[in-house]
Image (cartoon, coloured by chain):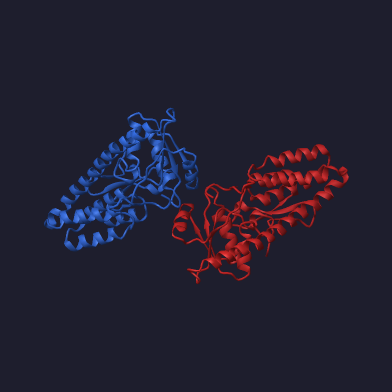
Chain colours: A blue, B red
Amino acid sequence: MPYRAIWIRDDRRSFGIIDQTKLPHEFVTETVGTVEQAAHAICAMRVRGAPLIGATAAHGLWLALEADASDGAMDKACRLLESTRPTAVNLLQALGQMREALSTLPPSKRAAAGLALAADMADADVARNRALGEHGWSLLQAIAGRAKGRPQRALQIMTHCNAGWLATVDGGTALAPVYAAHDAGMPVHVWVSETRPRNQGAFLTAWELEAHGISHTLIVDNAAGHFLQRGEVDVVIVGTDRTTAVGDVANKIGT
Amino acid sequence: MPYRAIWIRDDRRSFGIIDQTKLPHEFVTETVGTVEQAAHAICAMRVRGAPLIGATAAHGLWLALEADASDGAMDKACRLLESTRPTAVNLLQALGQMREALSTLPPSKRAAAGLALAADMADADVARNRALGEHGWSLLQAIAGRAKGRPQRALQIMTHCNAGWLATVDGGTALAPVYAAHDAGMPVHVWVSETRPRNQGAFLTAWELEAHGISHTLIVDNAAGHFLQRGEVDVVIVGTDRTTAVGDVANKIGT
C-alpha cells in the first residue's frame, strides 16, 4: 500500500506520519493531534528530512490554530515549532509562508485556511520532487551515455544519508532521479552508505530502495572512498541541507 | 590491575585472554586450554589485532603439542590455526617460527620447548612495541616542535581502528608512541574514529585511552575528513596489516 510520509487524516483534526525511528524493523504510523505532538515528532526524529520537517511544521501550525487561532497562540506555536530542529531552512520557510498568509485573516478563518494551505504545501512538495526527478533523470541519462567503457553495467549511483521519499512528503529529492530512471527501465545500482551516527542510509534509504525493487548495496561510510577510487561509481547524488548562492552545499557529515 | 592481552596461566596448561568482544561494557577474561579453543578465540574475534593473533596462534600450537606432539598433530594444529583469520601476516609468521624451531626436536621435548618459545615470542612483542613507542615518540616530539602556530594546544593525534595494547601482547603498535608521549608528560589529545563495521575504535581504542587517562574524542568515521580539513589534526598514526617493500600500507577500510 503506497504511503506519503505525511497525510491529513479523514477526521480533518489530525494528521498521520510514519514513525521513522522504528524503520526498517517495523512500519508504524502515528496520529498527530496537537502542535505539541507535531513538535515532538520533529524533535524525536520520528519525521526527518528537510522537506518533511517543513511540511510537518506547517501541519502542526494548522493544528495549533484549530485549538486557538489568536495572534498570541500563533506566535507561541511558531516559536515552539521553530525550536525543534536547527538543520534545514525548510522549517522556517514553511512557518513563514503559513504565517504570512494566515495572519491577515480574521482568527475565525485561520484554521480552515491553515488546513488548506498545509495540504497545498504538501502537494507542492510532491510536484517539485517529481520535476526534480525528471530533470535529474535526464542528467543520469547523459552520464550513462558517457560511461561507454562499460555498456553492460547498470549505472552505478552512490548516495549518502536519506534524501528519498521518507525525507519529503513524497517522491524524494536526491533519490527522485533514481526512482524516475528505474521506473523508466534504466538499469541502476545504488551504493548506500550506512550514514553514521544515525544510520539513515542503512535504516531508511536501503529500506526505501528495497521496497521499490531497486538494486542496491549497503556499505559502511568508510568504504565509500574505496569504491570511488576503484571506479565503481559513475555518479554521486546527495541531498542538501543548505545551498549557497555560488552552489556550495552543506549536508550530512561525510558528504 | 595491569593486564597483558595474553598470558600463560600458573597451571602452565592453559593461557588467559581478555574476551575483547565484551569490551567496553564488560572486562571478562577467559581461559584457553586447547588448540581448538585458541582457534575459536581468533575466529570469534575474542582476540584480534595482528600481533595478538600471532601470539595466540603460537600459544595455541603449544597447547596442541601438550596433547599430542607428533608431526601429524603439529601439522593438523597448524592448519587449524592458519585457517582462522586471513588478515595479518603475523599469524603465519608465528606458526612458521614455532614449527621451524620445534619440528627438529624429538616429540617428547616439543611441548616444553613450545611453551618456552611462545612465552619468548610474547616478550619479544612487548620489547618490540616498547622500542616502537620510543622511536615514534621522537617523531611526535619533532611534529609538536613544528606546530608552532598553536603552542598552547596539546598535540592532536588521529588514529583509526585499534592498534593499542589490546591488539598486541602489550604496549600497542600505533598507540605505543602515544602512550610513550603521555607517560613522559607531553600533552596529547587523540581523535578516535568509531571504525565501522566492528567499532574497534569506539569499543577498544577509546576504552584503552580512557583507562590510561589520555584525553580523547570519539568521532564517527565520516567526520575524520572534516577535522583534517579544519586543521584540527597534527598527525595521523595507524596500524598496518601489511606493508609493501616500497612503504605502501594496507590496513582497515577507511584508513
Instruction: Decide which of B119, A200 is in the foreground and name it.
Output: B119
Residue drawn at 21 percent across, 49 percent down: A118
Residue drawn at 28 percent across, 38 percent down: A135
Task: Tell me: A154 left or right of A40.
Answer: right
Give the image quarter of residue B208.
bottom right
Instruction: Decide which of B191, A61 is in the foreground and name it.
Output: B191
Picture layout, residue A247 above or below residue A191 = below
Task: Tell me: B156 left or right of B8.
Answer: left
Whether residue A205 is visible: yes
Residue B146 lies, in percent from the top left, at 53, 66
Task: Tell me: B40 left or right of A210.
Answer: right
Residue B111 lies, in percent from the top left, at 83, 47
Residue A32 lies, in percent from the top left, at 29, 50
Picture layout, residue B126 above or below residue A224 = below
Whether residue B37 is visible: no
Picture layout, residue A214 above or below residue B31 = above
